[in-house]
Amino acid sequence: MHFKRWLTGIILGVVLVVPLFVNAKWPLHIILALVSIMAMREIFDMLENAPPLALRLASYLISASLFVVISLGRVQDLPLVVASWTLLPMIGGLFYYGQAKESITDSVVKTIFAPCYVALPLGMLALVYRYPKGNLWILFLFVAVFAGDTGAFYFGRFLGEHKLVPSISPGKTWEGAIGGGLCTILAGLWFLHLTGLQEVGIRPAILLLAISIVAQLGDLAESLLKRTHGKKDSGSVLPGHGGLLDRIDGLLFAIPVLYYLISH
């Protein structure tokens, strides 16, 4: 299990990191669009009553359009894209009105939820990429979140005794959460020192603490989603990890924190 976990993590890391250091920006945008679509598909597969195929396809399409707009540099069109995430599923729902009426609203809401949960934060990551040294800031976030995820796993496995939220995620412990937080802070500060991206001090330490907290909340939020629908993993595409959503759940919650820091 550990070998598969590390091998998968390394391969995924290479896939995400290499595009950060090529001259063109579109390779990263394509990868983020594909990750969005794959993670959204896992969400739909998790649901007992998934939206109709037409609504799911529309959700994939309008999510991918977010990265097309960013890649073309048409940031002024982003509000139109985000608005379409709500308007198009509602328009699509009109064609299914003859079916059970209560299921139409349910399908429309699920179709809106998936891109808001997955594509929107990944789109914010694409926007961070546009800023000076944006590639290093994204790599900083990857290092911080994935170090915390790994630390939480091993601290919890070997030292965990006190359950964190057993009703949602029986395997998570306070020891794992604290160990993950320490690993996030240490790995993040080490990265800043190594790259000179920002002076090491109290401010970045507080930022890393915030990243650790929201990332672990993101992990718990996805656990809630899986537990509600009776799933152990969101999928099986990543050996040793489960689904793609299982691997990026904390990252999705941490991205807005980084985006706020970079954009202000």
Image (cartoon, helix red, strand yellow):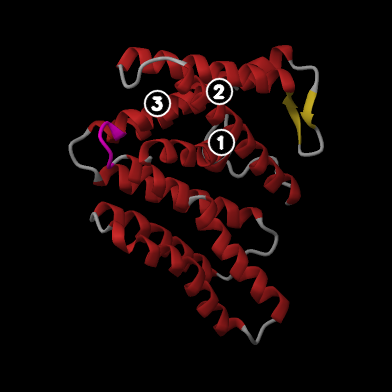
Residue 66 is labelled as: none
Pointer 3 residue: 140
Residue at 66% x, 19% y is 178
Pointer 2 residue: 148
Magenta stretch bounds = 130-134
Residue 94, above or below 250: below
N-term-proximal mark, 2 vs 1: 2
Q: Quadrant of the C terminus?
A: top left
Cβ–Cβ below 8 Å for labels 2 and 1? yes
Measure the C-alpha gap from mark 2 to mark 3: 12 Å
Q: State the SS at label 1.
A: helix
Residue 262, above or below 105: above
The amino acid sitting under disc 1 is Gly
The amino acid sitting under disc 2 is Gly
The amino acid sitting under disc 3 is Phe
Residue at 45% x, 22% y is 204
Label 2, residues with CA under 10 Å away: few <14, some 14-19, many ≥20: many
Cβ–Cβ below 8 Å for labels 1 and 3? no
Measure the C-alpha gap from mark 1 to mark 3: 14 Å
Pointer 1 residue: 250
Q: Quadrant of residue 193?
A: top left
Q: State the SS at label 2.
A: helix
Can residue 188 be seen in this snapshot? yes
N-term-proximal mark, 1 vs 3: 3
User: Is residue 234 left or right of 124 when viewed as pictured?
Assistant: right
Residue at 55% x, 23% y is 148
Q: Quadrant of the N terminus?
A: top right
